[in-house]
Image (cartoon, rainbow, N blue to C red):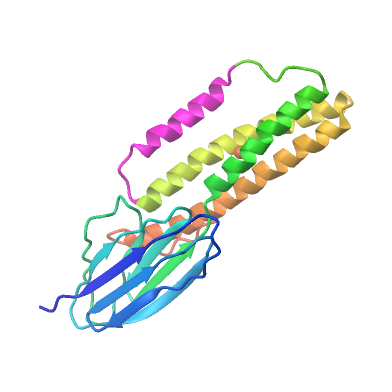
C-alpha cells in the first residue's frame, strides 16, 4: 500500500504582527506538506487538490497559533469529508482518515476570531469605567461579592476539564461565556435606567456603551458557535444531523 501523508505545520509569530499569509506548500502525489509561519491577525481560507493514489492520509500537524483558530477539512475523491478538525496542541496524535482514491481536497481556514481575548481587553475597560462612575458620583465601587458570577466562572472551569471533540468543547465554552455576557447585560440593563432616574446622564452614556459592547460580544459568540456546530454533523457516524439547518 502506498504511504500517503498530509503534514500541516502552523506557527504564529507575535500577536501584533501583520505578516501576510504565505504558506510554503509542497504538493506532490501522495505527499502534501504545508507550513505557514508568521501568521497573525489573518482570516483566510486556502484550498489545495492533492493526488492520493492510496486510500488514506496520515496527518501530522504541529499548530502553535497564539490566537484565533486553524481548521483543516479533507475530502476524498468522492467528495466525502473524511477529516474536519480545529487543530489544537491536544490533537497531537497522528490521525488516519480513510477514503476513496483520487484527487482529495484539503481546505485550511485560519480565523482570527479570538473573541475571548478581545473581550477580556474590553472587560478591563469596563472595570475602569465603573470605577470612574463611582468616583464621579462619590461612592465606593466595593460591594457584595457576586455569587452568581462566581458560579458561572466555576462552571466554565469545570467544562475545560472535559475530554471532548474540539468543536463540541468550543461551543460548550462559548455557551459558558454567553451565560456570563447575559448576566452582565442584566446588570447594565438595570443600572443604566437607575442612573437615568437619579439624574446622572454622563454615567448613563458610559453604562450604555458597556451594554452595547456586551451585546455585540454575545452576537459574535453566537455566530462563532454556529460555525463550529455546522462542522459537527459531518463527523457523526450516521451523519443523521447533516441536513439540519441551524438558526
Ligand atoms: Fe462581558
Q: In the current view of this chain or complex, which residue is farthest to the left?
A: 1
> Splitting the image into 4 quarters, where does residue 1 fall?
bottom left
* Stretch in magenta: 145-165
Locate residue 172, reporting x and y percent.
44, 43
The residue closer to the viewer here, 229 or 241, is 229
Residue shown at 54% from the left, 20% from the top: 147
- In the image, residue 56 sits, relative to residue 198, either above or below, namely below
Q: Is residue 83 left or right of residue 65?
A: left
Residue shown at 41% from the left, 73% from the top: 23
Instruction: Name the magenta segment's main secondary structure.
Output: helix
The residue closer to the viewer here, 107 or 131, is 131
Q: Quadrant of ligand 1?
A: top right
The residue closer to the viewer here, 91 or 56, is 91
- In the image, residue 240 sits, relative to residue 205, either above or below, namely below
Residue shown at 52% from the left, 70% from the top: 20
The answer to if 137 sits in the magenta stretch is no
The residue closer to the viewer here, 165 or 60, is 60
> Splitting the image into 4 quarters, where does residue 80 fall?
bottom left
Locate residue 50, reporting x and y percent.
30, 81
Asked whether the viewer can see residue 8, the reply is yes
Q: Is residue 246 left or right of residue 183?
A: left
Give the position of the C terminus as an image quadrant.
bottom right
Q: Is residue 157 left or right of residue 5?
A: right
Amino acid at each position: 500500500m502506498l504511504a500517503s501523508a498530509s503534514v500541516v505545520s502552523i506557527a504564529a509569530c507575535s500577536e501584533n504582527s501583520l505578516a501576510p499569509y504565505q504558506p510554503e506548500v509542497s504538493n506532490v502525489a501522495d505527499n502534501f506538506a504545508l507550513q505557514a509561519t508568521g501568521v497573525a491577525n489573518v482570516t483566510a481560507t486556502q484550498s489545495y487538490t492533492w493526488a492520493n493514489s492510496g486510500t488514506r492520509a496520515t496527518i501530522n500537524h504541529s499548530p502553535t497559533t497564539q490566537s484565533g483558530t486553524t481548521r483543516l477539512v479533507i475530502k476524498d475523491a468522492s467528495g466525502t469529508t473524511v477529516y474536519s478538525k480545529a487543530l489544537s496542541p491536544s490533537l497531537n496524535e497522528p490521525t488516519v482518515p480513510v477514503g476513496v482514491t483520487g484527487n482529495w481536497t484539503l481546505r485550511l481556514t485560519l480565523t482570527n476570531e479570538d473573541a475571548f481575548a478581545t473581550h477580556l481587553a474590553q472587560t478591563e475597560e469596563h472595570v475602569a469605567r465603573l470605577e470612574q462612575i463611582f468616583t464621579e458620583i462619590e461612592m465606593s465601587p466595593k460591594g457584595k461579592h457576586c455569587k452568581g458570577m462566581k458560579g458561572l466562572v466555576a462552571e466554565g472551569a469545570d467544562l475545560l476539564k472535559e475530554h471532548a471533540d474540539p468543536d463540541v468543547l468550543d461551543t460548550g465554552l462559548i455557551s459558558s461565556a454567553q451565560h456570563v455576557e447575559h448576566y452582565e447585560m442584566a446588570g447594565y440593563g438595570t443600572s443604566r435606567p437607575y442612573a437615568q432616574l437619579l439624574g446622572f446622564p454622563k454615567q448613563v452614556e458610559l453604562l450604555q456603551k458597556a451594554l452595547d459592547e456586551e451585546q455585540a460580544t454575545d452576537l459574535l459568540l453566537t455566530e462563532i458557535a454556529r460555525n463550529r456546530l455546522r462542522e459537527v454533523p459531518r463527523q457523526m457516524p450516521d451523519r443523521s444531523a447533516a441536513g439540519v439547518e441551524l438558526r
